[in-house]
Image (cartoon, rainbow, N blue to C red):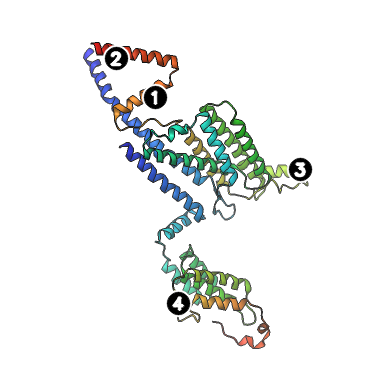
Amino acid sequence: MRLKLIQWLGIVWTLLFAAFVVWVYAAAPQSVADVATRASVAAGTYEVDRARFDAGRELFLREQYAAARGEWERADPARRDARTQFYVAYSFYREGWGRVYNDDPLFRRGLEAAGLAVALSPDAPLAVEDPELKIHSPAELKAELEKGLERTADDFNPLKVFRERK
Amino acid sequence: MEATRATETTEVTLDRPTLTTNRTRNRALLRHVVLPTIFLTVALLGGLRVAAESRAFLFVAPPLVTLLLAVMLLVLFARVGAVKVGRWLSADNGTAENVSHALTLGALFFASAQAFNSVLPEAGLPRLVLSCFFLWTLWQNQFSNFDPRRLLRSIAALFGTAFLVKHLLLASLSAPAGGWLSRLAAAALEGVTLGTLSGPAYAASTGYVSFFALALYVCGLALTPPSPPVETDDEREDRSAELARDLNLLPPRERALLIEELTRETEKEGRD
């Protein structure tokens, strides 16, 4: 093997390995599986596990919200899919919604997920065409969650109990 | 008998260039591929911690003090001749060779910083004490008489001590279940808080990772030649360069005698 070839091989290898080390410290994966997930995100080959997503939706429709979120967590471990994050936010909304009062901690987590869904679809607003849902965009859902967290005089309106869950 | 000896001599003569080529190639692979790989692996593992409860990886970037310590260590390497920077980065080297050497030295710098990061406690009084201990030791060493081998042993001892302090003594103090040292300290110093001594709790695997990183770092240092040999693709040129380098290692008087002898031989051959 010619020496020049070894030198160039060393340069390329060192630069690649150094880039990997810098990437690991920047991405801070939490496990070996997370390394693979984040690498696929960086390479642009990341995809949501469709089967797990559908399983989560089935649970969501049966009002098993925590279990549904567990499935979506596994379907989108890197939290890079706007649609999945929209459903996660929706599950927090439905679980936290109450006729008399809302569960604020759940709404806050929903707001976080809705914000992430909005941030993940910067080019075009996401529209989720699901007949089982009454809100079809992350921005709408975010507004609904924010409204639920607000403290207004309207909270004391007894007619509030007749409002409808979306 | 004579014929056999002649054949053996021929074989040895024929094998020599192959041996030289292999040696040159292996040395080049070591400097350009193996050493950067070792040092970058240390740079990767030096900041890795494993959380005690969740077992999640935590990557701790090198703090400023470790960069300062790494600079001091590299200056020390250069001062004692463990790394002759002028030979590693020289106008006599080719461009690719210089670039590769610069990357290897860069990797050595970050590996040193991360080796310190690996053995420095995360926060509090122990971190301050150990940082001062490292700074003091390295500053003292700048003015001591060392040869590369002794320096390597001294560095291995330095890291070994810090490893024991962080991963055995302090880890025992901050163990969630209360390690042996924590119980001992609690019994001996009844009523005294250990708040300034204990740090974040990490899984036992953090110690193993740190041990591996430090062992790899010391191996990398042991494998690093003080100055890279002259590289050429021509085997005869390569051998000449090697002989010239060996000649340079002789004391001046012996070198002068050898040169005189060789000149006499050459003159004799010319006359014949």
Residue reaching furthest to the front: B91
Kind of residue at disc 1: Arg
Q: Position of residue A62 (x, y in %)?
A: 51, 77
Kind of residue at disc 4: Val
Indicate which label's residue lies in the foreground, 4 or 3.
Answer: 4
The quarter of the rendered structure image containing the C terminus of chain B is: top left
> How far is mark 2 from mark 3, CA to CA?
81 Å
**SS at circle 4:** loop
Badge number at residue B266: 2
Chain of the residue where label 3 is placed in the rendered structure: B
What residue is rendered at 71% in x and 42% in y? B184
- The residue under label 1 is B245
Badge number at residue B189: 3
What residue is rendered at 51% in x and 43% in y? B110
- Same subunit, tags 4 and 3: no
- Kindly check if marks 1 and 4 are in contact, taking CB atoms under 8 A apart as contact: no
Indicate which label's residue lies in the foreground, 2 or 1.
Answer: 2
Indicate which label's residue lies in the foreground, 1 or 3.
Answer: 1
Q: Crowding at label 1, few (<14), some or many (≥20) Cα neighbours within 10 Å?
A: few
> How far is mark 1 from mark 3, CA to CA?
62 Å
Quarter of the rendering containing residue B32: top left
What residue is rendered at 33% in x and 38% in y? A4
- Give the left or right position of residue B45, taking residue A14 as reference: right
Indicate which label's residue lies in the foreground, 2 or 4.
Answer: 2
Indicate which label's residue lies in the foreground, 1 or 4.
Answer: 1
Residue reaching furthest to the left: B3
> How far is mark 2 from mark 4, CA to CA?
90 Å
Sequence-first disc among 1 and 3: 3
- The residue under label 4 is A128
